Amino acid sequence: MLHKSITSNKSVQAGRVSNRNEHDRLNQLAKTIKVPLFIAGVLPVVSGSLLLLQAWLLANILQLAIVDGIERAQLWPKVLIIAAIIIARALITAISEYVSQHSVRHMLGSLREQLFLKMLDNGPMWSRQIRSGELAYIISHQVEALEGFFARYIPSIFSATIVPLMFAIALLPVDIIAGALLIVTLPLIPLFMALVGWGAEAASRRHQGALVHLSGFFVDRVRGLLTLKLYGQAQAQADAVGKAANELYVRTMAVMRLAFLSSAVLEFFAALGVAGMAVYIGLSYLGMLDIKSSPFSLQTGLFCLLMAPEAYIPLRQMAANYHDRGAARAAISEIHNFFDNPCSLTSIGNQQPINSINIESGKSYALVGPSGSGKTTILEQLAGLRPCVSNVTIQGVPLFKWLDLDGHKKTVLIGQRPYLFAGTLAENIRMGRKFATDADVLSAAKAAGVWSFAKHRPGGLESRVGHHGSGLSGGQKQRVSLARLFLTDPDLILLDEPTAHLDKNTIKNILPAVFEFAQGKSMMIATHDHLVASMCDHTLKLDL
């Protein structure tokens, strides 16, 4: 029992710390748009003040028309004032919504840019560990889940805090009992909503987590659909997707139940307050309740009846947006877990250090060794994609200084599995230099051996390839990636098994062009090919 109690206390404490962190992160985002949020919160208060005047004028018009018998023509000025107030309130509402929506959309766009830059800073080693579907869902839907909190919930909190109290105080001089009824019943709504909201927030967290998991799970299965079909696992994975979707359904229904419970609590107390006001005024009119020093007039009674439901509308709006608070806190927590707590990159793959060497300008180096010896890891270290603890200098500059001096911008890394986009061959080659001319692209294609197969395709270099280069063989994809190299102007060239998918004749045709391009530059090639290694100035051997 003692162990359970200690565990429970630790969990509660951790939960409180987490809640404070989420609250602080949301506050930091809110500070970036504090002026628009303040305007969006103040304008409903201005609209509420106009509503008081509108209700008083309407009650006065009915008093004059029904009780005092004033002619209709004399009432038109007040009717026009009411019409003007209605138009003004509509404009105020529109301005408030525009200011909040516009500022929040701008803030969310900036947040997405920051997350994208963080993703780049964390590097590909970090992103490789995360399902692409989960990452896409975080940047798109989880960021989008913050919109309701800033655009609707925060302004509604401001309005729900001030406007009902303002209405209750306005009723006190008219009828102290009517004002007291509002003052007593209004706080009950947020109190019970908070009790229900704790459960709703916990359910929302579970729901958000299930959505992130299902997104990544589904995208990965779609991406590997062909492989699953080939190995007869399609039905098993379809059942797994169905199971995950059913879990999401259960969590969604749990959130919906709590949302309906929250609405029921709100409607119950709002109806109770309005009904209490109506019963009090009705019994007073019938003479069955005589606790006032002076009898109700039509104007005072009608004014109280008009304002009673209006006092609960800001609370209704807050309740309608209350789930946005839970969704935002769950979303900011997921965003933090993904981007602010990246796992240690030094634990990924073989981190074998390179011996103390200086990669000289104008020299080429062959990096040889059995599979798993860390050749790819070393190339990625030199490119700044992994941390490097080795004593390495590039052209006389220590590696860490080389990278600090924007060395990664002067480095080209061609990996074993080059990525090709859906588009033309020319567009894929032009990834090496965005504004390369057609003549430069053709020259690069010829140097890399792309033109030898592209000239036989309809459209030549303008022929299209699919996503991931579908429609091309492994060797053809490799040649397209090498063609990109010829459009760059690097100081350091890093090639990872550039000839792995090429036949001997193609290798003999392309390699001279690669080494000619590398003249005056530093080049390191990870390879198993003895021909490639023999053409390099130096050979670095790695062991398992």
Image: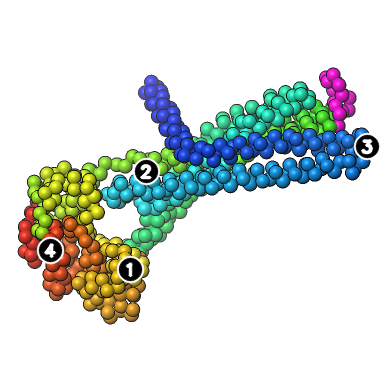
Q: Is 320 rendered above or below residue 176?
A: below
Q: Give the range drawn in magenta.
A: 284-298
Callout 4: SS:
loop
Q: Identify the residue shown where x is 22% and y is 43%.
A: 346
Report how far apart the C-alphas of labels 4 and 2 lie in the structure: 43 Å
User: Residue 231 at x, y = what percent?
Assistant: 32, 62
The residue pinned by badge 4 equals 519
- Mark 1 vs mark 4: give the one in front: 4
Q: Badge 1, how many Cα within 10 Å: few under 14, some, many 20+?
A: some
Does the magenta segment cover residue 252?
Answer: no
The residue pinned by badge 2 equals 338
37 sits to left or right of 11 = right
Give the amino acid at mark 1: Glu
The residue pinned by badge 3 equals 69
- Mark 1 vs mark 3: give the one in front: 3
Dominant secondary structure of the magenta stretch? loop
Q: Which of marks 2 and 3 is nearer the N terminus?
A: 3
User: Residue 296 at x, y = what percent?
Assistant: 85, 26
Report how far apart the C-alphas of labels 1 and 4 lie in the structure: 27 Å
